[in-house]
Amino acid sequence: MLTREGCPKTMLSIKDALEALEGKWKLLILFALSAGPKRFKQISKEVNGITDRTLSRELKNLESNKLIKREVHDTFPPTVEYTITEHGMSLERVIDELHFWGLAHRKEVIGK
């Protein structure tokens, strides 16, 4: 059990996690990729409302945090595919819990 008083290591680890996952898109991108490898346009269609520019930036950030892998296939024209890494898959429980919390929150706030 985490204690909340005087634990700078806990604060630092939470800060690190929030920085790696900041914004409203990263977890949605990871969720889309959890079903299997996808190309840029496939991700763009699944993550409704994201612009191509933002998606590109978020993919680069996720890759730098080793949550996804970008693979360029030797085809003509070159095919780029994104895959969630094992490190990225370690967020599965976090995403599941956010899903359940989101359902409960929607019911509490909106009543649906």
Image (tube, rainbow, N blue to C red):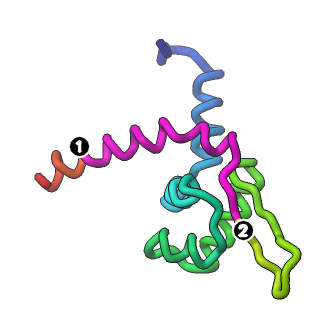
Q: Residues within 10 Å of mark 2 (few under 14, many from 20)?
A: some
Q: Is residue 50 above or below residue 66?
A: below
Q: Is residue 85 above or below residue 61?
A: above
Q: Which residues are magenta?
A: 82-104
Q: Is residue 3 above or below residue 108?
A: above
Is 88 colored magenta in this rendering?
yes
Is 71 colored magenta in this rendering?
no
Q: Residue furthest front?
A: 75
CA–CA distance in space, label 2 to label 1: 35 Å
Residue drawn 80% across and 64% down?
Answer: 71
Q: Quadrant of the C terminus?
A: bottom left
Q: Amino acid at mark 1?
A: Ala
Task: Report helix, strand or loop for mark 2.
Answer: strand
Q: Residues within 10 Å of mark 1 (few under 14, many from 20)?
A: some
The residue at which mark 1 appears reads as 104
Is residue 111 toward the left or the right of residue 52 in the image? left
Disc marking residue 42: none
